[in-house]
Image: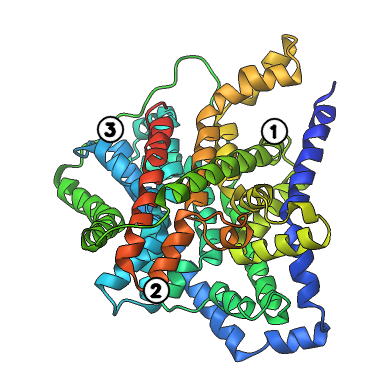
Amino acid sequence: MSASSRAEPVALLAAAVAALAVVPLLVVVPSALSEGVGAAAEFLFRPRLGQLLGNTGALVAVTVPATLVLGTLAAWIVERTRVPWASAWRTLLLMPLAVPAFVSAYAWTDLAPWLDGLAGAALVTTLAYLPFVFLPVAAMLRSLDPGDEEIARSLGLSPAMAMVRTVLPRLRPAIAGGGLLVALHLLAEYGVLELMRFQTFTTAIMQQYAVGFSDVAGSLLASVLLALCLLALLLDIALRGRHRVARVGSGVQRRAERMGLGAWTAPALALLAVLVGLSVVLPVATVVRWLAAADGFEGELLADTASTLGLALLGALAATAAALPAAWLLERRRSKRAHLLERATFLASAFPGVVVGLALVTLSVRWVSPLYQTVALAVIAYAILFLPRAMVSLRAGLAASPPELTEAARSLGAGGTATLVRVTLPLMAPSVLTGLVLVALAVVTELTATLLLAPTGVSTLAISFWREASALDYAGAAPYAAGMIGLSLPLTLLLRRQILEER
């Protein structure tokens, strides 16, 4: 069977996943145009839209560069220098993944009520989304062979220039993937922006849908958000590049030698301490203070924890399995069609959870009523929302696994399934686990889609926390926040072990 023939079944699977991912558009776009193109244009060309566009663009323009610079710099300090306590810093810099962003926002509003607007939103989102850049860059730095860098230095380049000329270009997939995740999360973020009183398209959409899902204005705003998502995806394609990362050749791949920091040791430690202190210590200490102030707890914490854990596992498995065909197609049979299918899976992730949730409710009630208010519908929503997390991880794993080994297995007579199970999956196992954990972490803290799609009587930690905190009952909300952190902590530690220790 030729290579192109082998790719067709995978392409069909990827097309099916892409079709599922764009399902919300089948509700949003017709609703947006239901009153005609003229009415839509009149609504969109208003000063209010300009203000929302400016706020959303400003947040992305501040937060994405900040996370790219801080995440890459922190990864380089931890992985390529002799900074003291590197292993501990490696763990602590991933800990923001265990602290939901809206819990951090609550902590900041409790400690600094004056902090709001663009400054507050950019600060909280930068600290919360920093691991999305730190994690892939650190993993890539550990896996890169130092041969090219050593050759550059032997030719007279300084250590800094050798890194700029040889290492940074090979980090582009990791940096671009991390930046794309941050941008998509910013476009869909609601909790942090609502608490920081910073209006963007997402908060405006939530306000419009609070009146009723048939509201045309909400769908029009969601359509603009979709256009911003497309812009982010096009920028990612331009920035990612086509540089090969995998290495096949004689000899064993080595780890890069760590360099001493000298007088820069204290500033490096100060930077890492500030990042960890603001992103982890501050919100966790605030939650502990809320817990200490609580008189008692009478909620359904255990039931909420069990339902949250079950939904997280199912959502992680569904999203990772759905991401595999398009990721494989793009890395092994790169073409315009592969790019189109992969990009389609990113579209709905830019929508707020409420848009995806309401779209699935509408479609299930009209066409597939047995799915309404079932766990399966909630899992489908998670797969649609969090496909990019799994996709970025799987693509990084496939990029680092040499395709020549797969072809060698096939030349020795192995079939497609045997090659996948015995060669491809073991090579990309760390990336698969990374995708599973990243999606599970997202499901643990997901709020709006779960609120709409969870079966009757089923609640989660995020829903209970938001309910109590919205009533300004911080002591009542504290156990649920602690539950989310406690549930996310082992997942984060597993992520660190799998990605940053086994490479």
Q: Is residue 404 left or right of residue 484?
A: right
Q: Secondary structure at mark 2?
A: loop
| Residue, disc 1 | 332
In the image, is 475 to the left or to the right of 204?
left
Disc 2 target residue? 471
**Eyeballing the image, is 241 above or below 60?**
above
User: For the point 75% across and 42% down, which residue is it?
Assistant: 14
Give the residue at mark 3.
258
Query: Callout 3: helix, strand or loop?
Result: loop
Where residue 371 sits in the image (x, y, percent)? 74, 52
| Residue under the point 67% across and 58% down | 347
Q: Amino acid at mark 1?
A: Arg
Quadrant in the rendering for residue 450: bottom right
Do labels 1 and 2 touch, CB within 8 Å? no
Q: Where does the image place residue 177, in percent across and percent down from the top left?
A: 54, 49
Residue pushed farthest top? 412
Q: Residue at x 36, y 57 (%)?
A: 298
For mark 1, give the secondary structure.
helix
Label 2, label 3: how many angstroms apart (C-alpha)?
Answer: 51 Å
Lower position in the chain sequence, tag 1 or tag 2 = 1
Q: CA distance from mark 1 to mark 2?
A: 52 Å
